[in-house]
Amino acid sequence: MNTLAGPLVIAAAFAYLLLLAGIATLADRRAAQGRSVIGNAWVYTLSLGVYCTAWTYFGSAGRAATSGVWFLPIYLGPTLAMVLAWVVVRKMIRISKTYRITSIADFIASRYGKSPSLAALVTLITVVGIVPYIALQLKALAGGYALLTTPVGAAALPAAHWWHDSTLYVALALAGFTIVFGARRLDSAERHEGMVAAIAFESVVKLLAFLVVGAYVAYGLFDGLADLAARVRAAPALAPLLRLEQGGRFAYEQWFALIGLSMLSTIFLPRQFQMMVVENVDERHVKRAAWAFPLYLLLINLFVLPIAFGGLLIFGAGRMDPDGFVLSLPLAHGQPVLALVAYIGGMSAATGMVIVETIAVSTMVCNDLLMPWLLRTRRFGALAAGDLTHTLLAIRRGAIVGVMLLGYLYFRLAGEAYALVSIGLISFAAVAQFAPAMLGGIYWKGGTKLGAQVGLVAGFALWIYTLLLPSFVKSGWLAASLLSEGPWGVDLLKPERLFGMGGLDSLTHSLFWSLLANAGGYVVASLVRRPSGQEASQALLFVDIFERSVVRRPVFWRGRARVPDLLKLAGRFLGAARAQQLIDEHPQSGAEPGVADARLVQLVETQLAGAIGSASARVMVAAVVEEEPLALDDVMRMLEESSQLRALDRLKDDFMASMSHELRTPLTAIRAVTELMRDDAQMPAAQRAAFLDIVVTETERLGRLVNQVLDMAKIESGHGEWHTDDVDLRELLAHAGQTTAAMFKERGATLQLRLPDALPTLRTDRDRLLQVLLNLLSNATKFVPREGGRVELRLRADNAGVTVEVQDNGPGVPADQQALIFEKFHQGGDAANRPQGTGLGLPISRRIVEHFGGRLWLRSEPGQGACFAFFLPWAGAAEASSRHTRHEGAAA
Amino acid sequence: MTQKIVIADDEPNLVIPLEYMLKREGYEVTIARDGQEALDAIARVRPQLVLLDVMMPRKSGFDVCQALRADEANRELRILLLTAKGRDDDVAKGLALGADAYVIKPFSPKELVAKVRELLEGAA
Amino acid sequence: MFQGLAAQRLLALFFAGALLLNFPLLALWDRDATVLGLPLFPLALFVVWAVLIGLTAWIVERGEDVE
């Protein structure tokens, strides 16, 4: 059998890594120029291929060689999960983008009241759970290298001292590359475009490499798949592997558990969450990924069985480690190049996993474990002033190296005891513990922090006890009696047969108990108490993410904050420039200068969360503002207010629609008429004159409408101009009568004034009051019958104030319309004699009267005419002006 | 045969130029000032096309449209809605109720005539 | 949560897939037979898998109700 020279392999591997780094750098540069390469659904899908690690490459064939199709369930699970991705993952993406959530720990912590303790707990679980998985990759890399470079029969020399162990240097080199990919600078959204591009590329490489080797085995070493199958069926030892039931009861529950477990891992593995949610640039990409990612998994698994069986047939059982078939088969048949290609593929898979996973975990360690603790210490705490961006970066890098070294440590101490697959499944089971808290968090408003804590602790504890502990026993660190007799001989507490539940393999057993305790604890503990204000508000923001538009999202915060303080805080973590930009983009509309409104506070907190995690951001912001704690009732009230705002918005929309119609109608006439005139030079003069009349009339109408609308807007927003004076009402009414005399004459109607002899003056706005009178009088002239119309204008005074009535002998207003005519744009009367009005006169009149503390109303019976009347109190003006100055101060 | 059009709109200053324009094109024009008048006029005159303003008193253009389409006799009648609202849901509503086309105010008279001709030519 | 035609179809497909890929429906394919020379069970598994993927693609790429 051929071998490859060690330096050749190392050089090839290095070259490949440099290629990846180059791609990453290129992509980052293009992103900085605004020409992102990753804004593409296919790149997104390929980036999810990071799910396939060295486990896929080496472990699948190994598993297939011993148990046939049992390698497949962990790829069927993601397929099923992706079917629902468009619903579930999309919600997670929306939530994460909106609240700048950058990791699973952050997600859970943020949802359950921004709790630092939860963040730390999740991080801890992740680190413990992922370290074995990283060790697995290192093991595959080391094993593969050994396979390629040591001749058959020669035992691979274990490194005498750890500093001679090449795998250590591999680990350190990987850490270095990871830093290059993910921790060169701080991106507050935790996006790493270069990394995504590189991962997408390596997904292609590993797929192609595997397909090539697979095709070689199937068609090069055998005469195609049918031939291979026939040979397998002919071998009695191997034939059962083609079947589901391989002699002995098929462990359906394990099959089911594996599918379920891998379903959860599709989302909850840190690297998957990172690629699927955090690095996602466009929600719609999820659509493509929903089927294309499972397709990728199908393709990469096509030749697993052929490779496994090929190896078994050619080498015979038990001679070669089946995990290495993908390398040993080409190598043994004089194809060193192919073997190298295969190794590059496997190395690509391992590296991709390590890089993404480590970056994701280091983000959590930095933001959710170390930062909250550091911020509590005096040196870095809220009171200190330094720029922390460098510190953050240093912590990230340190965490990356640290996690890699932990992985190496696990590899040294426990790597030999296990087939690759088993180690991986232990990690899957760890991250599955996040499922109840996360899925419950986005669908159940009742989930509370206590529930999440109890669930996570219970699940994690049981995972340790039923899965991790046994793995230590099987590695020889703990006494075997722990498994066979239980701790202190207690039979019911046997780690792999808890409470006597037997008949399950250790994985299914562990899954059952840990998820039961997790989900059960989550639900029960959540129901123990009502959610706090903070928890309830976060629950609403998460679960109802699709129901709330960005603009109208309620701000659940109450307190006082000063803009300079927020500016300084933001600067420490985002850089001074970005912080200033934030403040500039959101000018403060509060009454007092320098005081930040709730929206700005929330914005700063959200931005910070992107950099340091939501729990820490909460702590920091709380330190610089004076906050009032939110009770559950406050949250409910704020919610109600925001829904009222939505109702008001709808009214405003309707108003805008009516107004747009009212404005367009005269414009239509003007346009039609003027275009006709322009295009027809031969139009007869009489026709032209008639058309020009229309232009004039409609223009006037438009003008009136615009004036009235502006008037209305001014009055309603509190910016109306009011000039109060001592007004002689008798004189004013007489004046109104004179002004409208022409209208009455034209209509053939009479106006009669009934005024008292003497009257004190009223402090009011003369012009506005005249406006009201003219409006009422002109309305009257429009509705009295022609020739014979009679209108009476009456004035009365008493101790409270004055009353003015305009009575006409027109048709009157039916009861069902009486409220309507005060609405904007409503025009009374029937079509036959629709008067030329704007429909705004009465609403404006009412506003004016109400401004002075009065009332305007209608009294009418059909057939008995209509009486519009208004009342103005003597003291109205004084009240109005004091209201006015208050209004001026508060109006935005 | 001269083609007959009914214009249903309550704005007199708009009806005047419309009538002028369509008469100049050779159509026979009848005016209706509200929805009910429109239905009566259509029953009486049996036009080939009706210009329906959406916002009218008594019966809105939508109501008229619905009533017209409910009657089998009006299968060949072309309905052109005049709407100022321009909001997508209004337009959709109109089309759903059976209108053949719509024109958004303010429109150019040439645009309207072209639409009218298009609708009537199609029918022929 | 699962409003919309596409979402409901996806949910249905999810359950269908879960049923097809587990006991007892899975066991139906477990026979000692070959199709085109290929052993039935692994072949069936891959085909069912591919069909699932195809149906997902159909539901999601149709653009119906998937806003």
Image (tube, rainbow, N blue to C red):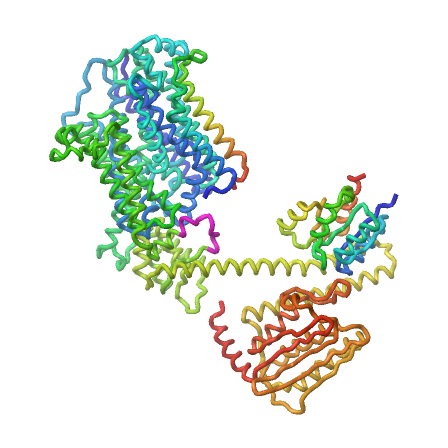
Extreme residue in the left direction: A488
Range of residues picked out in magenta? A540-552
Left/right placement of residue A385 relative to residue A94 reads left
* Quadrant in which the N terminus of chain A appears: top left
Q: Is residue A731 above or below residue A250?
A: below
Pick the residue in front: B123 or A828. Answer: A828
Extreme residue in the bottom direction: A758
Q: Position of residue A798 (x, y in %)?
A: 59, 87
Quadrant for residue A860, please give it: bottom right
Left/right placement of residue A197 relative to residue B39 reads left
Membership of A545 in magenta stretch: yes
Q: Is residue A1 above or below residue A15?
A: above
Quadrant for residue A158, please give it: top left
- Point 22% across, 40% down: residue: A461
Q: Position of residue A517 (x, y in %)?
A: 27, 41
Pick the residue in front: A95 or A638. Answer: A638
Q: Is residue B9 above or below residue A338?
A: below
Left/right placement of residue A803 relative to residue A414 reads right
Pick the residue in front: B24 or B3. Answer: B3
Q: Position of residue A189 (x, y in %)?
A: 38, 46
Membership of B93 in magenta stretch: no
